[in-house]
Amino acid sequence: MLNQGVGSILRPNLSSAQLVAAGGAGLLLGLACLRLSPLSVLGALTAILLVLTTLKRPEVALLGLVALTSSLVAEQDNPPIPIGFGTLYISDAILLSLFGLFIIRWMVEPQFRIVRTPLDLPLLAFYGVAVLSTLIAILQGSLPFHQSLEELRIVTNYLTFFVVTNLVREKRQLVLLWRGILLLAAIVAVATIVQYLLGESVTIIPGRVETLSTEGVEYSGVARIIPPGQSLILVGFVTMGVRLSQYRLSWTSLLALLHWGLVGSALLLSFNRNFWLGAGLALLLVAVLGEGRHRQRLVGWVLVSALLAATILLPLASVPDSRAANLVSASIGRLTSLGERETFQDSDSSLRWRDFEYAYALPQIASHPLLGLGLGARYRPFVLGMDHDAYDGRAYVHNGHIWILVKSGLLGYLSLMWLSLAFLLRALKYWRRIPDLEMRGWVLGFALTYLAVLLGSMVNSMLMQWFWTSVIGIMMGTNEAVIKNAVDKSRSDQPEADFHTIDNAQ
């Protein structure tokens, strides 16, 4: 027995190989720490881990990208990697690694095929025009290179679309990606609720944490909270609303209702009126587009949610000057302000004070109609009373449509509208043909969320916010992956084939 045991130890096997590998890795790590700084070693380990994760599970790398850009990480806290002529952030490294994997697989795997979709051309046209206008502005000397990097990074994140369509093809990958994103939305929602309970005097999350003010009326004790994960909050609320319309009463539906309630609470606490209107319009369209039983279920879940909210809030709100009473009053005041004339006519209202941006932006569009000023260009001078030491808005436009017209001209804007229209029309055309209920809910939910983004961008530049663009690219890519699979299944005799099998069979 002893000899047998010693022999088994000495015999080369997987366990001993792993032991040798671990020892060698530890030795190399020790030598690296002696020769290099701990920060450099940590950066190298992070890079290795990033590469290994990207190679094995691209969808997990995408989740990491979303976590860094669209959850609870402030833009300035995104870990930087100095590269001499600028700064490369970890989120940029993830996206570059994914595209590197895409190119390597295309070059070395004979069975790997590039997936083509009707959205490829308009997306490439939009991105190409934006980059071209920026290069021209840099070469002409009107735009410093370093000034263009932030907006170039924002627009580049739209290219997550191609990562999804080419590397996240299989159903299990898409399920992990979007359930992970919904989990991130729930985490952001919980953090938002906790921040509200703590008040604006103690800040635990990045973003805007401030006392609510609506058309000159300040609501003491009511905090307005808008974290970077606001994009996931809106996506999660709309998508889970669509999913609830598909659920019968069960433990799964109750968990979905809890998730919906969490993100809905965070949506409320943002006091973002364009989010409220966009979410309301999306739910209305779900009721209009859905089948009779789905419409009834959605109405039922909305009524249940309203009853639960009333049961909790009304007793608390009955106490004068309580936080619950102030919250209810502030919410009603914020919503009803949309029906007041002063909101749209008073020059001091939050909707009208931005008019000065149009006074500078429209002449710039007229003088640079085709290609615009380039990404990162300043379209107006420093305006006292609007700009200050803590805020320089010379390159910022609150209207996302005007922003894109100013920076990439009519060619860039029309390319984006081409992309948007194609995305929405294909979702509305194909969503009913998708047999999987969960994926059917995604396709419709993402389309309705994007419609809310398009409309909301008239007063909030969501189309050019870094916590939105990667999410938009992933939503579009997911829809195309699901629609392609559904169309392929309808044309094949392989009803059980997954994404990867169908792609390779063509």
Image (cartoon, rainbow, N blue to C red):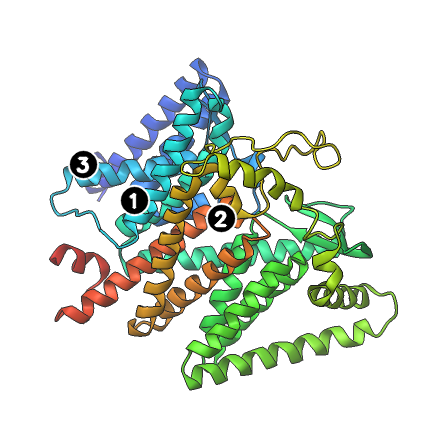
- The three-letter code of the residue at mark 1 reads Lys
Sequence-wise first label, 1 or 2:
1
Most foreground residue, 257 or 148: 148
Q: Residue at x 68, y 58 (%)?
A: 271
Residue on which the image places disc 3: 11
Residue on which the image places disc 1: 56
Circle 1: element type: helix
Q: Residue at x 50, y 66 (%)?
A: 238
Most foreground residue, 176 or 504: 504
Q: Is residue 409 above or below residue 425?
A: above
Q: Residue at x 67, y 53 (%)?
A: 351
Position in image of residue 410 (x %, y %): 42, 43
| Location of the C terminus (image quadrant) | bottom left
Position in image of residue 31 (x %, y %): 39, 17
Left/right of residue 450 with respect to residue 222 in the rendered view: left
Q: Is residue 79 above or below residue 506?
A: above
Residue at mark 1 to residue at mark 3: CA–CA distance: 30 Å
Residue on which the image places disc 2: 463
Outermost residue on the right side: it is 320
- The three-letter code of the residue at mark 2 reads Leu
Mark 2 or 3: in front is 2
